[in-house]
Amino acid sequence: MVLFIIAIICALVTIGCFICSVADSDNRETLVGIGIFALILTFGLGIGSCIKAVPTGHTGIVTTFGKVEDYTYEAGVHFDAPWKKIVKMDNRTQKEQIELSCFSSDIQETRVVYTVNFQIDKANAQLIYKTVGKDYFNKIVQPKVLESVKGVFARYNAESLVEKRGVLSTEIQDILSEAVAPFAIQIVGTSIEDIDFTDTFTDAVEQKQVAEQNKLKAQTEQEQAIIEANAAAEKKRIEAEAEAQANIIAAQADAEVAKIGADAAEYQGIKDAAIMRNLGEMLNKYPSLVDYYRVTGWDGQLPETYMGSGDVLFELTN
């Protein structure tokens, strides 16, 4: 717009020079030269005022004397009427970090560092500029972030805020996305960078954790002792059963050995009796058999003594 105003001034200078050159013949050439230069400058400035440049990553909002037009320009060079102004809106993903204080459901004060990534809807960039302006972060995004974070944190107690950090981030992002959507702003991503409580609460949590760890350790040691005692008792039971079983087996083996020995003795007695019985039967059946064995078994030597009648012992000499 400034170039266009300068171009108009140059055009007026051109017209004035040509008019003056007609009336002032002495300075005609000088006035004509100035007029020609002003004319060239007018055309240059006029064309330059029609060139509209939009940098990469931005959307051009077209306004006519402050009125927002229904169309926008993408990044690049464009030609439009010199009285139209281009407002550049950043459509890239932007990142902002917000620090705030909020309270949990059990009234514990919490300091939160929250990061939000957002961008505008390029197709509706003129709507954002028309309804909010270029400072849409401070006017829309930041207040909605504060509202969403505080609302979600108030649903949980202090301990749950630490344990459910991922759930909190998801809930906040969902609420925040819905809150800024009517303003053509998109939430790309969010994260809870830090959650900090008061020193008193932090000390209490640490003491509770230490107590729980000690309790868990005691329970573990007790369970280990019970397991070891059960294992020792089981071992003794198994050893006793094994010893008893071994005694039973040994007793059964001794009984079997004794039975076998008795059976063997009985068998030998039966065998000897049978032999004696057979021998007696043979002697009764063959009385001369004794004489036969005595004669066949004689070694040819006569006895030196002989028992006579009346128990008189005679000594025989050759």
Image: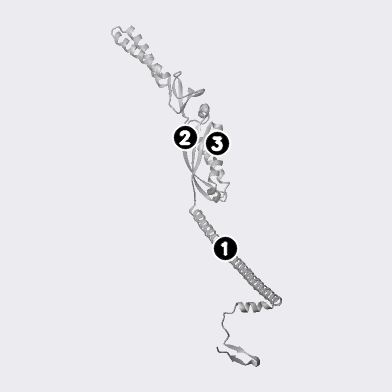
Tell me the quadrant of the picture where the N terminus can be found.
top left
Mark 1 or mark 2: whose residue is earlier in sequence = 2
Tell me the quadrant of the picture where the C terminus can be found.
bottom right
| SS of the residue under disc 1 | helix
Real-space CA distance between mark 3 and mark 1, rounded to the nearest whole angstrom: 60 Å
Vertical placement of 236 versus 154: above or below? below
> Which tag is nearer the camera, tag 3 or tag 1?
1
Q: Which amino acid does label 3 sit on?
A: Ser
The residue indicated by pointer 2 is 94
Real-space CA distance between mark 2 and mark 3, rounded to the nearest whole angstrom: 15 Å
Mark 3 or mark 1: whose residue is earlier in sequence = 3
Q: Which residue lies furthest to the front in this view?
A: 318
The residue indicated by pointer 1 is 231
| SS of the residue under disc 2 | strand
Q: In this view, does 24 lie to the left or right of 88?
A: left
The residue indicated by pointer 3 is 177
The answer to which quarter of the image holds residue 307 is: bottom right
Vertical placement of 185 versus 254: above or below? above
> Which tag is nearer the camera, tag 1 or tag 2?
1
Residue at 53 percent across and 42 percent down: it is 169
Vertical placement of 228 versus 198: above or below? below
Q: Which amino acid does label 2 sit on?
A: Gln
| SS of the residue under disc 3 | helix
Q: In this view, does 278 lie to the left or right of 89?
A: right
Residue 79 x %, y %: 44, 18
Which of the two residues, 94 or 208, is positioned nearer the viewer here?
208
Mark 2 or mark 3: whose residue is earlier in sequence = 2
Report crowding for label 1: few under 14, some 14 to 19, many 20 or more residues within 10 A (C-alpha). few
